[in-house]
């Protein structure tokens, strides 16, 4: 069992991005349902997004993953080169304007030049766009190109140096081992079994297409939701403690109702949505694999 000193958490370790479906407001509810002895388990989060639960828990052994390569690049850059990242973000903060925003947004239109950009520049670009785009919405078109308009905020906080430095320190602690992956969610949890905890927070099921799922070209349809359910079942049978968040829809309930899993109703307020009528309080569920 880790010592009290080893479990001390830094309150500045928290999400550095705004992200559709982020779990900051639901942390109190989610943490009620973490498994007993959670601190001793290896943590997996295959749809990490902005990492609200991951940063809240600050596990010592973890695997985090997201299919968004640019997002995962920001995690890696914060761990390896935070000082240069901060210097670049300060430049973006100083130069922020609508013209500057569209200049940076358009950099991925030239795929060859964009591929040659240093990782720090790509990471700072994503953070800058996230903090200054309309409604904090990360969205790409069918070609995978970021296409959100400028947000026209007054003095947005583009470079939260204290948070970035705190995350850097956490990820580089001697007793912390975090694998940062980008790829398919099933691959990310393939080694999870007894002694593991997995938190699944996928793009939410949206039969009326009002929930935002435009993080990547191609979306996350019902076929992927069904495959996710199969992974949830398979990892549970291997002994992993699995917890999943999703929309409270008949389809999602039907996927998880026949295996003895506990389905817990929760309410959340959503401020990022492709349709303004889809913002506000919405019904969600937590699916829990253990008793």
Image: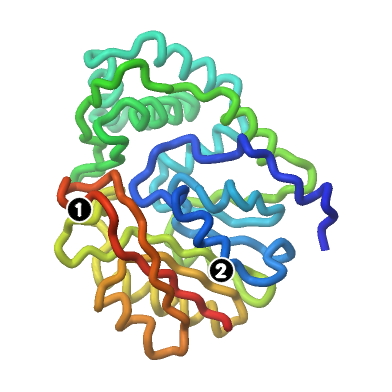
Marks 2 and 1, how far apart in space?
Answer: 27 Å
Image location of residue 35, percent across then percent down: 63, 71
**Residue where numbered disc 2 is placed:** 33
Q: Is residue 193 above or below residue 117?
A: below
Disc 2 on helix, strand or loop? loop
Which residue, given by chain and number where applicable, does mark 1 sit on? 278
Q: Is residue 272 above or below residue 26?
A: above
Q: Of residues 61 and 38, which is closer to you in this image?
A: 38
Q: Position of residue 128 (x, y in %)?
A: 38, 25
Name which of mark 2 and mark 1 comes first in the sequence.
Answer: 2
Q: Answer yes or no: do the residues labelled 2 and 1 have beta carbons within 8 Å?
A: no
Q: Residue at x 74, y 64 (%)?
A: 40
Q: Give the residue drawn at x 30%, y 83%.
A: 254
Most extreme residue toward the top is: 94
Query: Where is residue 84 shown, x and y percent of the image?
Result: 56, 19
Q: Quadrant of residue 165?
A: top right
- Residues 64 and 38: in front is 38
Q: Secondary structure at mark 1?
A: helix
Kindly identify the residue that appears in the image at 25 percent across and 77 percent down: 251
Above or below residue 88? Residue 204 is below
In the displayed structure image, the side of residue 46 where residue 153 appears, left or right? left
Q: Residues within 10 Å of mark 1 (few under 14, many from 20)?
A: some
Q: Residues within 10 Å of mark 2 (few under 14, many from 20)?
A: few
Q: Which color mode does the image show?
A: rainbow
Residue 218, relative to residue 79: is it above or below?
below
**Where is residue 185 shown, x and y percent of the image?**
44, 63
Residue at the (36%, 16%) spot, across then down = 155
Quarter of the image with the N terminus is bottom right
Of residue 197 and residue 249, the one placed in the foreground of this image is 249
In which quadrant is the C terminus drawn?
A: bottom right
Q: Which mark is residue 184?
A: none
Which quadrant of the view contains residue 172?
top right
């Amino acid at each position: 069992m880790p010592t009290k000193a080893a479990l001390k958490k830094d309150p500045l370790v928290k999400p550095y991005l705004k992200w559709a479906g982020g779990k900051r407001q639901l942390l109190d509810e989610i943490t009620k349902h973490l498994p007993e002895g959670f601190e001793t388990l290896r943590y997996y989060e295959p749809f990490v997004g902005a990492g609200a639960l991951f940063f809240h828990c600050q596990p010592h052994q973890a695997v985090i993953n997201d299919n968004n390569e640019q997002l995962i690049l920001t995690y890696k850059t914060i761990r390896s080169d935070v000082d240069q990242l901060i210097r670049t973000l300060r430049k973006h903060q100083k130069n922020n304007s609508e013209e500057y925003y569209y200049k940076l947004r358009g950099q991925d239109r030239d795929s060859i030049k964009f591929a040659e950009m240093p990782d720090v520049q790509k990471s700072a670009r994503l953070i800058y766009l996230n903090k200054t785009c309309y409604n904090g919405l990360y969205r790409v078109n069918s070609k995978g190109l970021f296409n959100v308009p400028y947000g026209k905020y007054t003095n947005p906080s583009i470079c939260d140096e204290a948070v970035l430095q705190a995350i850097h320190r956490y990820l580089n602690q001697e007793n912390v081992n975090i694998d940062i992956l980008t790829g398919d969610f099933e691959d990310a949890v393939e080694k999870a079994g007894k002694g593991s905890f997995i938190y699944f927070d996928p793009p939410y099921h949206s039969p009326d297409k009002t929930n935002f799922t435009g993080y990547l070209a191609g979306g996350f349809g019902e076929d992927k939701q069904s495959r996710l359910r199969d992974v949830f079942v398979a990892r549970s049978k291997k002994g992993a403690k699995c917890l999943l968040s999703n929309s409270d829809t008949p389809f999602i309930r039907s996927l998880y109702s026949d295996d003895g899993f506990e389905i817990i109703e929760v309410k959340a307020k959503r401020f990022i949505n492709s349709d303004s009528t889809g913002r506000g309080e919405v019904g969600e569920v937590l699916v829990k694999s253990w008793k």
